[in-house]
Amino acid sequence: MKCPNSGRPLFFLSLLAPSWLMKLSEQMRRRRSVCGACFFFPVSLRMGRRSLFVALLAVAVGVYLLPSPIDPKPHGPPPALEGPLAVNTRLQKGRRLFTGKLHGPESFTADEHGNVYTGTVDGKLWRIGPDDSLTFITHMGQNLPECGCSTDYEPVCGRPHGIRLDRHGQLIVADSYFGLHSVDPKTGEKTLLLANSEGADGVPFTFLNGLEISSQTGIIYFTDSSSRWGRRHVKLEVIELNSLGRLLSYNPQSGSVTVLLDSLYMPNGIVLSPDEDFLLLAETSIGRILRYWLKGPKSGTKEVIMDNMIGYPDNIRLSDHGTFLVGITTPRFRKFMPPFLDMIAPYPVVKRFLAKVVPLNWYNILLPRYALVLELGLDGELMGTLHDPEGRLTWAISDVFQHRGRTYLGSTDLPFLPILEGWDS
């Protein structure tokens, strides 16, 4: 995927600098164009140490007084890497497919013919054949050259997250910006089921994410990760640690939407149990997994089955051998230094300050290049983990999908598809 050059002044700086710094740089550039050397030379002669101190103090006070976009909460320390969490290299025994062709294959589903389907960061849906052929299906939004190059274009290009096949062989897609869609996997024809603007209980959807479909009833379960932050501001959602997400269900027959749970911490991936008596839900920003009961005496209630996790969970999938597989998008343990999010986790004041001045692009630099998958029993007990400590095969795993003896490892923005031909649990 090639991204066009914007050609805008200070474009390269705009990728890194916060908006207030960009405005200051633009003002300085304009003054230089008018005055030439008269701008810097006299100032450099006149400005003494006191003036410099006053200027820096004014900037510091100004930044402090700026309103922060987030209202963060504290976070506890992560568990130790021991027992089932001990480091290994099981995730390094794979290979990459479609390098440079698939950018951010987030989640997967498969049909009875062996075709695997996924959506990418540029708003496209794809079919991967049993022979590893790659076929484009459709665009969720507009087809622009900038799609996939910048999150600024996501609201017009779309970003498919959860994807499943329903009982009629149609793809059901949760697009973060465009809502729930039914897509014909053969023709690419899209049918809108539920728009973000419709929402539920008077609250529009802002960040559709996880998706699951009942094979028994056809009910579609999905998550809206936040009522405040959209997908392109996901880093602020994680840093703020708020509880503005919801778990919902959609009945395709009646078109009705039901809020099952609210006040969730960035609800993300969901998965039904084999008997569909409960579903598991990942609360990404707080590092927690919930069980929500759909049947039985506990129906309609939730319980925590894993808390203060070793990393931030993304999608949860049922494995070929009857366990749950959890993709960890970012680990929470020391590698060369304590992880950035955990260093600032106990300090809401620091979070608030960083949200004012640090561009969202910079946070990626601070995230460790480490891949991690958790394997849970049906009771939620941690059975084992798979690691790639150096990120040789992949990192920041969003999904762990098994089909016909192969394991597909998803990501939110990596330009390839990692796979494992076997499973070393």
Image (cartoon, rainbow, N blue to C red):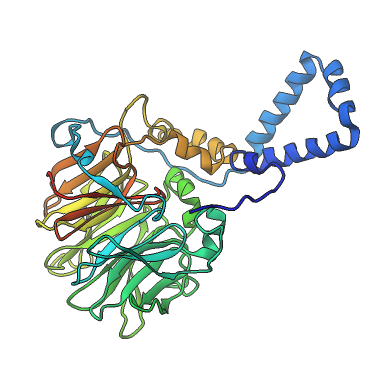
Tell me: 349 left or right of 173: right
Q: Residue at x 27, y 33 (%)?
A: 389
The residue closer to the viewer here, 18 or 392, is 392
Tell me: 197 left or right of 167: right
Percent coordinates x, y for residue 66 in the rendering? 65, 40
Task: Name above or below for residue 334 compared with residue 280.
Answer: above
The residue closer to the viewer here, 2 or 202, is 2
Q: Quadrant of the C terminus?
A: top left
Q: Quadrant of residue 146?
A: bottom right
Percent coordinates x, y for residue 311 in the rendering? 30, 41
Q: How many marks?
A: 0
Tell me: 62 left or right of 219: right
Residue 259 visible in the displayed image:
yes
Percent coordinates x, y for residue 160 in the rendering? 40, 63
Percent coordinates x, y for residue 268 in the rendering? 34, 56
Task: Name above or below for residue 325 compared with residue 193.
Answer: above
Task: Name above or below for residue 9 compared with residue 4.
Answer: above
Q: Residue furthest bottom?
A: 254
Q: Quadrant of residue 173?
A: bottom left
Q: Residue furthest top?
A: 49
Residue 308 visible in the displayed image:
no
Q: Residue at x 88, y 31 (%)?
A: 36
The residue closer to the viewer here, 212 or 31, is 31
